[in-house]
Protein backbone atom coordinates (compact mmCIF):
# COMPACT_ATOMS: atom_id res chain seq x y z
CA UNK A 1 0.00 0.00 0.00
CA UNK A 2 1.33 3.43 -0.96
CA UNK A 3 0.51 5.76 1.93
CA UNK A 4 1.24 9.45 2.41
CA UNK A 5 1.66 10.59 6.02
CA UNK A 6 1.23 14.35 6.46
CA UNK A 7 2.39 16.09 9.66
CA UNK A 8 3.90 19.43 10.63
CA UNK A 9 7.54 19.64 11.76
CA UNK A 10 6.91 20.23 15.48
CA UNK A 11 8.36 17.21 17.35
CA UNK A 12 5.03 16.46 19.03
CA UNK A 13 3.51 15.80 15.61
CA UNK A 14 6.45 14.85 13.39
CA UNK A 15 7.78 12.15 15.75
CA UNK A 16 4.51 10.16 15.93
CA UNK A 17 4.19 10.45 12.15
CA UNK A 18 7.69 9.00 11.71
CA UNK A 19 6.88 6.21 14.17
CA UNK A 20 3.76 5.38 12.16
CA UNK A 21 5.77 5.37 8.92
CA UNK A 22 8.12 2.82 10.49
CA UNK A 23 5.11 0.65 11.35
CA UNK A 24 4.01 0.82 7.70
CA UNK A 25 7.52 -0.10 6.53
CA UNK A 26 7.62 -3.11 8.85
CA UNK A 27 4.32 -4.29 7.35
CA UNK A 28 5.68 -4.07 3.81
CA UNK A 29 3.91 -0.83 2.87
CA UNK A 30 5.42 2.18 1.08
CA UNK A 31 5.09 5.29 3.28
CA UNK A 32 6.07 8.78 2.17
CA UNK A 33 6.31 11.44 4.89
CA UNK A 34 5.28 15.02 4.12
CA UNK A 35 6.86 17.23 6.81
CA UNK A 36 9.48 19.91 7.40
CA UNK A 37 13.07 19.33 6.20
CA UNK A 38 14.46 19.22 9.74
CA UNK A 39 13.59 15.51 9.95
CA UNK A 40 14.41 14.49 6.36
CA UNK A 41 17.80 12.91 7.10
CA UNK A 42 16.50 10.85 9.99
CA UNK A 43 13.48 9.66 8.01
CA UNK A 44 15.56 8.84 4.93
CA UNK A 45 18.06 6.99 7.11
CA UNK A 46 15.22 4.81 8.36
CA UNK A 47 14.08 4.04 4.82
CA UNK A 48 11.12 6.43 4.74
CA UNK A 49 10.48 8.47 1.60
CA UNK A 50 10.10 12.21 2.27
CA UNK A 51 8.51 15.25 0.65
CA UNK A 52 8.55 18.84 1.83
CA UNK A 53 5.28 19.90 3.44
CA UNK A 54 4.71 23.10 1.51
CA UNK A 55 2.52 25.99 2.63
CA UNK A 56 3.63 26.11 6.27
CA UNK A 57 5.01 29.65 6.17
CA UNK A 58 2.55 32.29 7.44
CA UNK A 59 1.06 34.48 4.73
CA UNK A 60 0.52 38.25 5.11
CA UNK A 61 -3.22 37.76 5.55
CA UNK A 62 -2.90 35.05 8.23
CA UNK A 63 -3.88 35.78 11.83
CA UNK A 64 -2.15 33.20 14.00
CA UNK A 65 -4.02 34.51 17.04
CA UNK A 66 -7.18 33.07 15.47
CA UNK A 67 -6.88 29.31 16.00
CA UNK A 68 -9.72 28.54 13.60
CA UNK A 69 -8.14 30.50 10.79
CA UNK A 70 -4.72 29.04 11.57
CA UNK A 71 -6.02 25.48 11.28
CA UNK A 72 -8.67 25.70 8.56
CA UNK A 73 -7.63 28.47 6.17
CA UNK A 74 -3.99 27.40 6.36
CA UNK A 75 -5.16 23.83 5.76
CA UNK A 76 -6.88 24.84 2.54
CA UNK A 77 -3.72 26.63 1.41
CA UNK A 78 -1.52 23.64 2.33
CA UNK A 79 -3.82 21.29 0.44
CA UNK A 80 -3.26 23.33 -2.72
CA UNK A 81 0.50 23.54 -2.19
CA UNK A 82 1.02 19.80 -1.68
CA UNK A 83 -1.52 18.62 -4.24
CA UNK A 84 0.98 18.20 -7.13
CA UNK A 85 3.48 16.20 -5.06
CA UNK A 86 0.75 14.16 -3.41
CA UNK A 87 -0.89 13.37 -6.73
CA UNK A 88 2.46 12.38 -8.28
CA UNK A 89 3.09 9.65 -5.71
CA UNK A 90 -0.30 8.02 -6.48
CA UNK A 91 -1.22 7.32 -2.84
CA UNK A 92 -3.80 4.71 -2.03
CA UNK A 93 -4.32 6.24 1.43
CA UNK A 94 -3.45 9.50 3.19
CA UNK A 95 -2.85 9.78 6.94
CA UNK A 96 -3.17 13.40 8.05
CA UNK A 97 -2.15 14.76 11.44
CA UNK A 98 -5.04 16.36 13.31
CA UNK A 99 -3.38 19.80 13.21
CA UNK A 100 -2.28 19.46 9.59
CA UNK A 101 -5.77 19.25 8.18
CA UNK A 102 -4.50 20.18 4.73
CA UNK A 103 -3.48 16.58 4.21
CA UNK A 104 -7.05 15.42 4.57
CA UNK A 105 -8.36 18.18 2.30
CA UNK A 106 -5.79 17.30 -0.36
CA UNK A 107 -6.75 13.63 -0.17
CA UNK A 108 -10.41 14.52 -0.56
CA UNK A 109 -9.62 16.67 -3.59
CA UNK A 110 -7.83 13.69 -5.15
CA UNK A 111 -10.64 11.28 -4.30
CA UNK A 112 -8.30 9.26 -2.05
CA UNK A 113 -9.48 7.88 1.33
CA UNK A 114 -7.83 9.41 4.36
CA UNK A 115 -7.35 8.74 8.04
CA UNK A 116 -6.74 11.28 10.83
CA UNK A 117 -3.86 10.81 13.27
CA UNK A 118 -4.27 12.36 16.73
CA UNK A 119 -0.94 12.15 18.61
CA UNK A 120 -2.81 12.66 21.89
CA UNK A 121 -6.24 11.79 23.38
CA UNK A 122 -9.45 12.40 21.45
CA UNK A 123 -10.21 16.12 21.63
CA UNK A 124 -13.61 16.18 19.93
CA UNK A 125 -16.28 17.83 22.10
CA UNK A 126 -18.61 15.50 23.97
CA UNK A 127 -22.16 15.90 25.25
CA UNK A 128 -21.05 14.48 28.60
CA UNK A 129 -17.66 16.11 29.27
CA UNK A 130 -16.53 19.59 30.25
CA UNK A 131 -14.88 21.45 27.36
CA UNK A 132 -11.55 19.95 26.32
CA UNK A 133 -8.76 22.20 27.56
CA UNK A 134 -10.44 23.10 30.84
CA UNK A 135 -8.52 20.39 32.66
CA UNK A 136 -11.66 19.54 34.63
CA UNK A 137 -12.84 16.06 35.47
CA UNK A 138 -16.39 15.22 34.34
CA UNK A 139 -18.79 16.72 36.84
CA UNK A 140 -20.33 14.37 39.41
CA UNK A 141 -23.98 14.49 40.43
CA UNK A 142 -26.59 17.00 39.34
CA UNK A 143 -24.51 20.07 40.17
CA UNK A 144 -21.51 18.70 38.27
CA UNK A 145 -23.59 17.93 35.19
CA UNK A 146 -25.11 21.40 35.32
CA UNK A 147 -21.64 22.94 35.56
CA UNK A 148 -20.44 20.99 32.53
CA UNK A 149 -23.56 21.95 30.58
CA UNK A 150 -23.00 25.64 31.33
CA UNK A 151 -19.36 25.40 30.27
CA UNK A 152 -20.30 23.63 27.04
CA UNK A 153 -22.81 26.38 26.30
CA UNK A 154 -20.12 29.02 26.87
CA UNK A 155 -17.82 27.35 24.33
CA UNK A 156 -20.48 26.39 21.78
CA UNK A 157 -20.26 29.71 19.95
CA UNK A 158 -16.51 29.29 19.38
CA UNK A 159 -17.10 25.73 18.13
CA UNK A 160 -19.78 26.90 15.70
CA UNK A 161 -17.48 29.67 14.47
CA UNK A 162 -14.71 27.13 13.88
CA UNK A 163 -17.06 24.91 11.88
CA UNK A 164 -18.07 27.90 9.76
CA UNK A 165 -14.40 28.71 9.13
CA UNK A 166 -13.81 25.11 8.06
CA UNK A 167 -16.79 25.19 5.69
CA UNK A 168 -15.57 28.42 4.10
CA UNK A 169 -12.03 27.04 3.78
CA UNK A 170 -13.32 23.89 2.12
CA UNK A 171 -15.42 25.86 -0.35
CA UNK A 172 -12.41 28.02 -1.21
CA UNK A 173 -10.66 24.96 -2.70
CA UNK A 174 -13.71 23.52 -4.42
CA UNK A 175 -14.84 21.05 -1.77
CA UNK A 176 -18.42 20.80 -0.45
CA UNK A 177 -18.98 22.85 2.70
CA UNK A 178 -20.12 19.80 4.65
CA UNK A 179 -17.10 17.91 5.95
CA UNK A 180 -17.54 14.12 5.79
CA UNK A 181 -14.54 13.66 8.08
CA UNK A 182 -11.89 10.94 7.95
CA UNK A 183 -12.58 7.29 7.33
CA UNK A 184 -11.00 6.57 10.73
CA UNK A 185 -9.33 8.39 13.61
CA UNK A 186 -6.15 6.93 15.07
CA UNK A 187 -5.90 8.04 18.71
CA UNK A 188 -2.24 7.60 19.65
CA UNK A 189 -2.44 7.70 23.44
CA UNK A 190 -2.50 5.45 26.47
CA UNK A 191 -6.00 4.39 27.55
CA UNK A 192 -5.07 5.74 31.00
CA UNK A 193 -5.06 9.28 29.56
CA UNK A 194 -8.46 8.94 27.90
CA UNK A 195 -11.74 9.98 29.52
CA UNK A 196 -14.77 7.69 29.08
CA UNK A 197 -17.59 9.28 27.11
CA UNK A 198 -20.99 7.91 26.02
CA UNK A 199 -20.62 9.41 22.54
CA UNK A 200 -17.26 7.88 21.60
CA UNK A 201 -17.18 7.90 17.77
CA UNK A 202 -17.22 4.48 16.11
CA UNK A 203 -14.49 5.73 13.77
CA UNK A 204 -12.06 6.48 16.65
CA UNK A 205 -9.55 3.80 17.67
CA UNK A 206 -7.02 3.96 20.52
CA UNK A 207 -3.74 2.66 19.10
CA UNK A 208 -1.32 3.59 21.87
CA UNK A 209 1.49 6.18 21.79
CA UNK A 210 3.58 6.40 18.63
CA UNK A 211 7.08 6.91 20.01
CA UNK A 212 10.25 7.63 18.05
CA UNK A 213 13.74 8.63 19.12
CA UNK A 214 15.48 11.28 16.97
CA UNK A 215 18.95 10.01 17.93
CA UNK A 216 20.82 6.81 18.73
CA UNK A 217 23.15 8.62 21.15
CA UNK A 218 23.15 7.44 24.77
CA UNK A 219 23.49 10.41 27.12
CA UNK A 220 26.21 10.03 29.77
CA UNK A 221 24.73 10.05 33.26
CA UNK A 222 26.21 12.07 36.13
CA UNK A 223 28.36 10.04 38.49
CA UNK A 224 26.94 8.91 41.82
CA UNK A 225 24.15 6.77 43.18
CA UNK A 226 21.53 9.40 43.95
CA UNK A 227 18.07 9.13 42.32
CA UNK A 228 18.06 10.26 38.68
CA UNK A 229 15.68 13.05 37.69
CA UNK A 230 15.16 13.26 33.94
CA UNK A 231 14.27 16.76 32.73
CA UNK A 232 12.82 17.38 29.28
CA UNK A 233 11.91 21.01 28.56
CA UNK A 234 8.86 21.41 26.33
CA UNK A 235 9.53 21.50 22.59
CA UNK A 236 6.26 23.38 21.97
CA UNK A 237 6.40 27.14 21.40
CA UNK A 238 3.73 27.44 24.13
CA UNK A 239 5.88 25.66 26.71
CA UNK A 240 6.97 27.25 29.98
CA UNK A 241 10.26 29.18 29.71
CA UNK A 242 13.12 28.85 32.17
CA UNK A 243 12.53 25.23 33.18
CA UNK A 244 16.18 24.18 33.14
CA UNK A 245 17.32 27.11 35.27
CA UNK A 246 14.51 26.52 37.74
CA UNK A 247 15.25 22.81 38.02
CA UNK A 248 18.91 23.50 38.77
CA UNK A 249 17.98 26.02 41.46
CA UNK A 250 15.36 23.71 42.92
CA UNK A 251 17.38 20.50 43.12
CA UNK A 252 20.82 21.84 44.08
CA UNK A 253 21.86 20.21 47.33
CA UNK A 254 19.08 17.61 47.39
CA UNK A 255 21.35 14.67 46.55
CA UNK A 256 19.71 13.82 43.24
CA UNK A 257 21.35 13.53 39.85
CA UNK A 258 19.81 15.31 36.87
CA UNK A 259 19.84 14.38 33.18
CA UNK A 260 18.50 17.10 30.88
CA UNK A 261 17.25 15.72 27.58
CA UNK A 262 17.05 18.45 24.95
CA UNK A 263 17.11 18.92 21.19
CA UNK A 264 18.95 22.24 21.43
CA UNK A 265 22.50 23.01 22.58
CA UNK A 266 22.77 22.37 26.35
CA UNK A 267 23.80 25.11 28.78
CA UNK A 268 27.49 25.56 29.53
CA UNK A 269 29.22 25.13 32.90
CA UNK A 270 26.75 22.68 34.41
CA UNK A 271 27.50 21.33 37.92
CA UNK A 272 28.89 17.76 38.15
CA UNK A 273 25.56 16.30 39.29
CA UNK A 274 23.93 17.39 36.00
CA UNK A 275 24.30 15.96 32.50
CA UNK A 276 22.64 17.46 29.42
CA UNK A 277 22.32 16.97 25.70
CA UNK A 278 20.54 15.02 23.01
CA UNK A 279 20.17 11.38 23.97
CA UNK A 280 17.67 8.56 23.71
CA UNK A 281 14.88 9.25 26.18
CA UNK A 282 13.76 5.63 26.26
CA UNK A 283 17.23 4.70 27.58
CA UNK A 284 17.20 7.54 30.14
CA UNK A 285 13.82 6.37 31.42
CA UNK A 286 15.26 2.98 32.36
CA UNK A 287 17.40 4.83 34.95
CA UNK A 288 15.06 7.65 36.00
CA UNK A 289 13.04 7.73 39.22
CA UNK A 290 11.03 10.78 38.20
CA UNK A 291 10.62 12.98 35.13
CA UNK A 292 10.13 16.75 35.01
CA UNK A 293 8.51 18.05 31.83
CA UNK A 294 5.99 20.39 30.31
CA UNK A 295 3.07 18.00 30.07
CA UNK A 296 3.15 17.64 26.31
CA UNK A 297 1.70 14.34 25.20
CA UNK A 298 4.90 12.89 23.74
CA UNK A 299 6.93 13.06 26.94
CA UNK A 300 3.96 12.25 29.16
CA UNK A 301 3.05 9.13 27.18
CA UNK A 302 6.69 8.03 26.95
CA UNK A 303 7.23 8.44 30.71
CA UNK A 304 4.05 6.61 31.70
CA UNK A 305 4.69 3.87 29.14
CA UNK A 306 7.97 3.28 30.98
CA UNK A 307 6.19 3.34 34.34
CA UNK A 308 7.99 6.49 35.51
CA UNK A 309 5.99 9.20 37.36
CA UNK A 310 6.27 12.79 36.19
CA UNK A 311 6.16 16.33 37.53
CA UNK A 312 4.27 18.33 34.90
CA UNK A 313 4.81 22.05 34.44
CA UNK A 314 2.16 22.84 31.82
CA UNK A 315 2.31 25.76 29.44
CA UNK A 316 -0.25 26.53 26.75
CA UNK A 317 -2.03 24.40 24.18
CA UNK A 318 -3.26 21.07 25.50
CA UNK A 319 -0.64 20.77 28.24
CA UNK A 320 -3.04 21.94 30.96
CA UNK A 321 -5.60 19.32 29.96
CA UNK A 322 -3.04 16.53 29.85
CA UNK A 323 -1.32 17.53 33.10
CA UNK A 324 -4.62 17.43 34.95
CA UNK A 325 -5.54 14.04 33.50
CA UNK A 326 -2.21 12.58 34.62
CA UNK A 327 -2.59 14.13 38.09
CA UNK A 328 -6.09 12.66 38.47
CA UNK A 329 -4.76 9.27 37.38
CA UNK A 330 -2.23 9.52 40.23
CA UNK A 331 1.04 9.31 38.28
CA UNK A 332 1.87 13.02 38.29
CA UNK A 333 2.08 16.18 40.35
CA UNK A 334 1.13 19.39 38.55
CA UNK A 335 3.25 22.47 39.29
CA UNK A 336 1.89 25.84 38.24
CA UNK A 337 3.19 28.47 38.48
CA UNK A 338 6.75 27.23 38.23
CA UNK A 339 9.01 28.07 41.18
CA UNK A 340 12.06 26.37 42.73
CA UNK A 341 10.24 25.65 46.00
CA UNK A 342 7.20 24.09 44.32
CA UNK A 343 9.33 22.02 41.98
CA UNK A 344 11.61 20.77 44.77
CA UNK A 345 8.62 19.77 46.88
CA UNK A 346 6.97 17.91 43.99
CA UNK A 347 10.12 15.95 43.09
CA UNK A 348 10.76 15.00 46.71
CA UNK A 349 7.14 13.89 47.21
CA UNK A 350 7.29 11.57 44.22
CA UNK A 351 10.64 10.16 45.32
CA UNK A 352 9.36 9.36 48.82
CA UNK A 353 5.77 8.25 48.10
CA UNK A 354 5.52 4.92 46.21
CA UNK A 355 1.93 5.60 45.15
CA UNK A 356 3.10 7.70 42.21
CA UNK A 357 5.31 4.95 40.78
CA UNK A 358 2.49 2.45 41.31
CA UNK A 359 0.07 4.67 39.41
CA UNK A 360 2.58 5.10 36.57
CA UNK A 361 2.92 1.31 36.36
CA UNK A 362 -0.88 1.04 36.23
CA UNK A 363 -0.96 3.55 33.37
CA UNK A 364 1.66 1.53 31.48
CA UNK A 365 -0.41 -1.62 31.96
CA UNK A 366 -3.35 -0.10 30.08
CA UNK A 367 -1.32 -0.34 26.86
CA UNK A 368 -2.53 -3.91 26.37
CA UNK A 369 -5.99 -2.92 25.08
CA UNK A 370 -4.87 -1.30 21.83
CA UNK A 371 -5.70 -1.59 18.16
CA UNK A 372 -3.14 -1.97 15.37
CA UNK A 373 -2.96 1.27 13.33
CA UNK A 374 -1.58 -0.43 10.21
CA UNK A 375 -4.33 -3.06 10.26
CA UNK A 376 -6.91 -0.30 10.69
CA UNK A 377 -5.51 1.55 7.67
CA UNK A 378 -5.56 -1.62 5.58
CA UNK A 379 -9.14 -2.22 6.67
CA UNK A 380 -10.03 1.30 5.54
CA UNK A 381 -8.96 0.36 2.01
CA UNK A 382 -10.22 -3.21 2.04
CA UNK A 383 -13.07 -3.54 4.55
CA UNK A 384 -13.96 -7.08 5.52
CA UNK A 385 -17.38 -8.02 4.23
CA UNK A 386 -19.63 -9.59 6.85
Image (cartoon, helix red, strand yellow):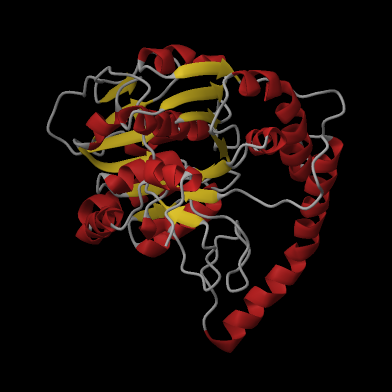
Residue 1 falls left or right of residue 320: left
Residue farthest to the left?
A: 225
Q: How many labels sit on residues? A: 0
**Residue 297 visible in the shown view:** yes
Q: Give the residue at x 83% y 52%.
A: 164
- Residue 216 at x, y = what percent? 28, 18
- Residue 24 at x, y = what percent? 38, 32
Residue 14 falls left or right of residue 231: right
Is 64 situated above or below 157? above
Q: Quadrant of the C terminus?
A: bottom left
- Residue 60 at x, y = what percent? 86, 23
Q: Give the residue at x 32% y 32%.
A: 27
Q: Quadrant of the N terminus?
A: top left
Q: Quadrant of residue 273?
A: top left
**Residue 255 visible in the shown view:** no
Q: Quadrant of residue 262?
A: top left
Residue farthest to the bottom?
A: 142
Q: Give the residue at x 51% y 34%.
A: 13
Q: Nearer the viewer, residue 220 or 115?
A: 115
Q: Nearer the viewer, residue 282 or 163?
A: 163
Is 322 situated above or below 306? below
Residue 102 falls left or right of residue 194: right
Residue farthest to the front?
A: 385
- Residue 338 at x, y = what percent? 50, 44
Amino acid sequence: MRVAVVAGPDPGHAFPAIALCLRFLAAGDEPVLFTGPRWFDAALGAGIGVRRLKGLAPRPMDDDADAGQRIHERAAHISTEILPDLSAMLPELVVSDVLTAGGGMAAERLGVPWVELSPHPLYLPSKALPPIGSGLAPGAGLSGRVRDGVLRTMTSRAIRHGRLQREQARESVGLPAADPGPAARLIATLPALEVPRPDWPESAHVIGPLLWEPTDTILDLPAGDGPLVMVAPSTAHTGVAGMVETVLAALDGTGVRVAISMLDTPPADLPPWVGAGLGRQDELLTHASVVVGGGGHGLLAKSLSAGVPIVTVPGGGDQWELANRAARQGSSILVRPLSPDALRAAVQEILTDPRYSAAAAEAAATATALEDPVALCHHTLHPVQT
